Image (tube, coloured by chain):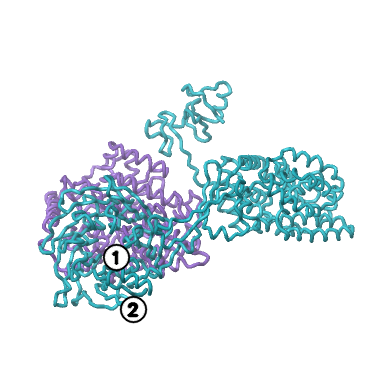
Chain colours: A purple, B cyan
Amino acid sequence: MNSALLQQILQVGNEDAQMHALFADSFAALGRLDNVTLVMVFHPQYLESFLKTQHYLLQMDGPLPLHYRHYIGIMAAARHQCSYLVNLHVNDFLHVGGDPKWLNGLENAPQKLQNLGELNKILAHRPWLLTKEHIEQLLKTEEHSWSLAELIHAVVLLTHYHSLASFTFGCGISPEIHCDGGHTFRPPSVSNYCICDIANGNHGTDEMQISPTGSISTAESLCEVEVLMEKMKQLQECRDEEEASQEEMATRFEREKRESMFVYFSEEEELAPTRDVSRHFEDTSYGYKDFSRHGMHVPTFRVQDYSWEDHGYSLVNRLYPDVGQLLDEKFHIAYNLTYHTMAMHKDVDTSTLRRAIWNYIHCMFGIRYDDYDYGEINQLLDRSFKVYIKTVVCTPEKTTKRMYDSFWRQFKQSEKVHVNLLLIEARMQAELLYALRAITRYMT
Amino acid sequence: MEKMARVTTALGGNTITGRTMFCHLDAPANAISVCRDAAQVVVAGRNIFKIYAIEEEQFVEKLNLRVGRKPSLNFSCADVVWHQMDENLLATAATNGVVVTWNLGKPSRNKQDQLFTEHKRTVNKVCFHPTEVYMLLSGSQDGYMKCFDLRKKDSVSTFSGQSESVRDVQFSIRDYFTFAATFENGNVQLWDIRRPDRYERMFTAHNGPVFCCDWHPEDRGWLATGGRDKMVKVWDMNTNRAKEIYCVQTIASVARVKWRPECKHHIATCSMMVDHNIYVWDVRRPFIPSAMFEEHKDVTTGIVWRHLHDPYFLLSGSKDSTLYQHIFKDASQPIDRANPEGLCYSLYGDLAFAAKESLISSDSNRKPYIGDRRHPIFFKRKLDPTEQFEYISSSSALSVFETDVESGSMDWFVRTAKQYVLAGRPLAELCDHNAAVAKELDRNQVAQTWTMLRIIYSSPGTVSSANLNHSMGKGSASLPLMNSFNMKDIQSGMGSESRLDRSKGESRPENILMDSSSTLINNDDNEETEGSDVPADYLLGDVEGDEDELYMMDHENPHAEEQEYILPQEAFPLRHEIVDNPSALDHLQEKADSPHVSGNEAETVSLTPVESFSLISISHSLYENRLPPDFFSPIVRDMLLFYAEQGDVQMAVSVLIVLGDRIRKEIDEQTQEHWYTSYIDLLQRFQLWNISNEVIKLSTCRAINCLNQASTTLHINCTNCKRPMSNKGWICDRCRQCASMCAVCHHVVKGLFVWCQGCSHGGHLQHIMKWLESSSHCPAGCGHLCEYT
């Protein structure tokens, strides 16, 4: 885990009573306090909703048997080579009585789960390619078919774990102590430090500044924040002065979408996949990267025609009662979460910034809001930030600590975690929208 | 055409005629609106904006408003509305947040009139003032409502809902200044157009977004709202607090609601997801739509009544790219297909059952028995003709079945459940035991069934003659039941009799027994078929009463008794019953109400031993029985079905468990599951938790077996602060102490924990048991006199 992050967590952790309650809840429900929880606790309001949803998905009544749920979690996390989540769920999977043989690879799992592999792949990397034929394939009546309710459960689990993998890499969460890699210094993701170091009390070495490179250009990055705030203010106040033409708006969206394809980190840090992870997915070559290189066209999905609030919610709630409500709350909290602060400034209206981030992510998935001017994104999100967003959302396994450090240098760690929450919820909603739309089309 | 003529007069010269028809649009529609004269309709969507003329036989495209080479987002409409005063004036809400007005009177091809780009987000709804020509209202995703004066360039006033996105805005039809707005967070606000600073009133109408609302065209206080929570609610706004007066539960989130003209209680709805039909509800009958239009293949996005004063024509647009005109008489009416029935138990165990009269009277056997408490009392309610249930011409009959205390007592059920042994011993012993239990409770037919099962399935060596004998005696007691009805059964009885006589003539004792047992089973079989023939009154009147009535009958009819004890000697009881039958039937009907006789059982028992010799001799012959047990499977299966049908699911399940694999495959899985769940439900109602668990454990159905693993949560109170423990750990989150401490040894209890429900104190099972040997007070010293059961 990021050392600086951890420092702050430990600081915060001493004071907050609500946090304690959340920790206790989480501990009671899971029998452990995982590092994801420890990081998310910066935002207790969100964490509560997150834990509730996760608990419901994994442990409460639902169409899928318990070991299936964990196995699907493993499948999803493995798509992004997220060893942290995989290990966590391997343990859970065995704990609820899953067959250890399945862990030797997807081909050892029941045919039914194997059939889900394709959906997993598409959802993780190119959800817009999902069609009703895929759904049909899974649902058609034969021995290993899925029921609609099961499918919805699986889809929610898949998207949940895809985005959670993003969070894991985005915040550089390290393995649990009791898991593989938990005791070593081997960097499994971004991390240079293991939580166990700190937990064991040897954090004397950990005297790093909040932003390691910050000292070089404190002044410069200081004004980074100011500039950003200025821009936000401008956008909020004088938006009707220079109204762009409709064509211009459409082009802006297309441009943003296209550009998002090419936003890429320059260096190719090939991280060797952890040995026990790769076996879960058969087709490593299938990734977001491939098509973007070839400049593949992402079709536009109009959110006004299929939105979570109007359509997705109803469908989920119909087939998997209560989950629609839980997800709805979670999206809502993530989208509206604000403390009215930015770095060192107070009483800031961050809604434009949050909306820009949210819409930028949806834009990468080809989801368009008719009522949004995509020019705003360019003004508010600088390149390093875009690189970070793009990497975390699309290829989380490529995230590096440098990326994490290099965007928004003056911002607090908690704000960076906040960004990550936006990222994962927006990603989850985008994937869900595509999946649910395909299911709706199948049903009509 | 008669109807059409009526319509014509009603509208004072403005003729509306037509038929159910549709036309294909090029693209999915988002909203539709009609012109005042009901002759034109405008359809708007993301890629369509057209006006169609509604003609007699078809829709004719009149105008395409989507002009220009590269249509901008301003044409991408979320909503459209046609002014009801000025037929040249239209307004649309664009998905990019622009409100556009259109003037059809413009000579140019582009009819676009004015453009208001004030909203920051998608505009969900636009609405013209019903009487004011220039006033337009819009509600947007950004949470603002704006009122425009079409003579000015900008909005006149802005209303901030201070909550979330606005989903619908509607001017009140009668109140000049009032409009209603609905919000994504479930609120509805009422505004005065003159006061943009604050809403007049706000209330929470739905759980989740309120997608739509509609003012009642006549009753000015009524507002209907529809939400994502699948409800349509009607609010009376005349009072200080908005009062919910009607609520209709639909099957999917409600996208639009529209009051039906000229029908005070009718409202049309369509849904946003999953369900493609349009329903017209009578809000007073919220459970079944009064009419249904099923034409669309994808979700309906817009509905509108064609004319303000005509209730028979409904237009609708849909995502499936069609525009429909629905005629009311072509609507399907679910009420026709429904069999309205109501069933309710009263506090005292009386059962009221109401059904459509036609359903009940079609059953000619069924006659009201007035004055007989066990039989239904019929009430008939003719509907008040002044009430306007135009499509529901129903009169229903209400039957009330009173239960008298004794037959309603389920004591036998509880005792049977407790005493039955279902597993853990050889089959024969189980059967014997259960037969004895049943007999003790005067349930002779059941006892006999058990004995027969033993004979059929267990190895011959274990047959005990006494039991057999005994069961035969009882068997005869149960026979009047089966004979009490119609000739068919008697004839079948005769058939078996002659067969029996013949075999007796051949003097092959084993056959005799064989036959006799199969005859007995046949009897069961017959009873089962009777079960369905029995007049339903009787069956419903006292499901459990068979035995009682048998006794009653026997008592009234001493000579039947006499014959009974002769019967076992012949191993065939039927003959005399036949002779006796008519009188028995009379008694059943006349004396059904008479008190039960308790001494009867003793008499029967005392009589049977006399005959036991013959039976013993016969029972020996059973050894030679070479027929495989599954020869009887169909019969046993029918027998189980019969019991279940009769309401004695206990018997069905018990036999199922005891026989296990011998019979399981004969009965389909679903039926079994059904029986198990009913039985378990019953057991749990009687709080026989242990037994229900045992049944769950013993069941072979997978669905039942896993019941044991569900809801194993236990809610407990903290021993310190006596508050409920919300946490799942050992620590109480209020007083931050270990909650489950043993009051005796003061260690945390892990494992078996017993505690007093009065004071929440407790501890290790052994410790507490030891403690209570010496003291009756709580070991924690709280002074409570603990009770552990």
Task: Determine if residue B198 is in view.
Answer: yes
Q: Position of residue A142 (x, y in %)?
A: 51, 67
For the C terminus of chain A, give its image quadrant. bottom left
User: Distance from label 2 to label 1 (Cα)?
Assistant: 21 Å
- Label 1 marks which chain's residue? B
> Pointer 2: what residue?
B57
Q: Which mark is residue A28?
A: none
Closer to the chain start, of discs 2 and 1, is 2
User: Picture quarter containing residue B136?
Assistant: bottom left
Q: In the displayed structure, would residue B612 be above or below residue B80?
A: above
Mark 2: secondary structure: loop
Three-letter amino acid code at disc 1? His
Mark 1: secondary structure: loop
- Label 2 marks which chain's residue? B
Q: In the displayed structure, would residue B716 be above or below residue A85?
A: above
> Pointer 1: what residue?
B309
Please state which of residues B690 and A272 is positioned toward the viewer in this rendering: B690
Three-letter amino acid code at disc 2? Glu
Q: Is residue B548 left or right of residue B59?
A: right
